[in-house]
Amino acid sequence: MTVSPALLETLKSIDDVKVFLKTLHDHFGDRMAIATSGQLTGEVILDLCVKAGFKPRVYTVDTKRLFPETLALFDAVEKKYGIKIERYYPDPAELKTLVEENGEYLFFDSKEKQELCCRVRKVLPNERVLRTLDVWVTGLTADQSASRQKMPRAEIIERVEDGKKRSLLKVSPLVDWPESKVREYANANGVPVNPLMNREFPGGWRYESLGCVICTTPIGPFESRRAGRWRWLNQDASKECGLHLPPPTHG
Ligand code: SF4
């Protein structure tokens, strides 16, 4: 199947996005799945799919450090849409080794240790899902961070799995949706929302990006949206966990 540039450029309306998702699903079926981290965009994409007439695979990587509110949101989403969200967890042996060698709170030590923790708890479980997919649908948007501003709506990722090369289509259907549009859609369509995303703290502090409990703090009125992630690290450092960095060249 070819995803033509013309199709991608015409995704101007909400109905266009629905047609795009349905076209992908018609072709790839269960080789396509939406990734959700319990924020807002994954659930909006799911709602668009359901309104387009199909129920896609949806998955999450449960790092075992997620907010209780995030886990409750997954339950609410399953109930509302009549689906089962696939949960992928860190490998117990890899987790045990990680903690034994580096301690439970290694991510406070350095950017490298944070990336190591994210790799074991998030990236490697996500890799296991990607092996089952031809289309990886993400809720990434350009306004989430400076490093995501030039992100394409669709890209082919060349992977190597078990020594064999193959292509994976990574799609971010809401890439050009500002946060206000995502929220407007969620409110207008009764999409379950993580209560943390609506919580206001004194001084206008709020959550705009959610990850593991200990690594996530609210942001102030003038901070960038991912400033609350790994706050103890240099604010100029990459605020990525590794899921959306270039893929490994070995399988
Ligand atoms: S966000 Fe923090 S606890 Fe979660 S995987 Fe990354 S470093 Fe580890």
Image: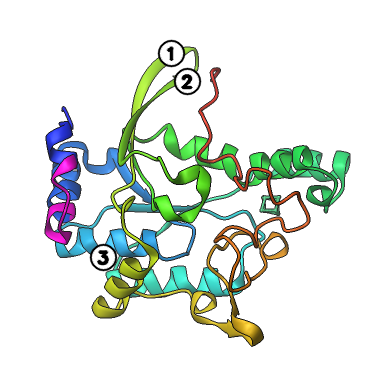
Does the rendering let one see residue 153? yes
Q: Where does residue 230 sit, x and y in percent of width and height? A: 71, 55
Image quarter of residue 237: top right
Task: Find out whether residue 13 is within the magenta segment.
Answer: yes
Which residue carries the number 2 mark? Answer: 161
Residues at circles 3 and 1 in contact by the CB criterion of under 8 Å: no
**Badge 3: residue crowd in 10 Å (few <14, some 14–19, many ≥20):** many
Q: CA distance from mark 3 to mark 2?
A: 32 Å
**Badge 2: residue crowd in 10 Å (few <14, some 14–19, many ≥20):** some
In primary-sequence order, the first of circles 3 and 2 is 3
Which of 137 and 129 lies nearest the eye of the viewer?
Answer: 137
Residue 216 horizontal side relative to residue 245, left or right: right
The region drawn magenta spans 9-17
Residue 200 horizontal side relative to residue 185, left or right: right
Q: Where does residue 91 sit, x and y in percent of width and height? A: 65, 42
Task: Find out whether residue 107 is within the magenta segment.
Answer: no
- Compared to 93, does 86 lie above or below? below
In primary-sequence order, the first of circles 3 and 1 is 3
Under circle 2, the secondary element is strand
**Marker disc for residue 164:** 1
Residue at 48 percent across and 74 percent down: it is 194
Image quarter of residue 204: bottom right
Q: Amino acid at mark 2?
A: Glu
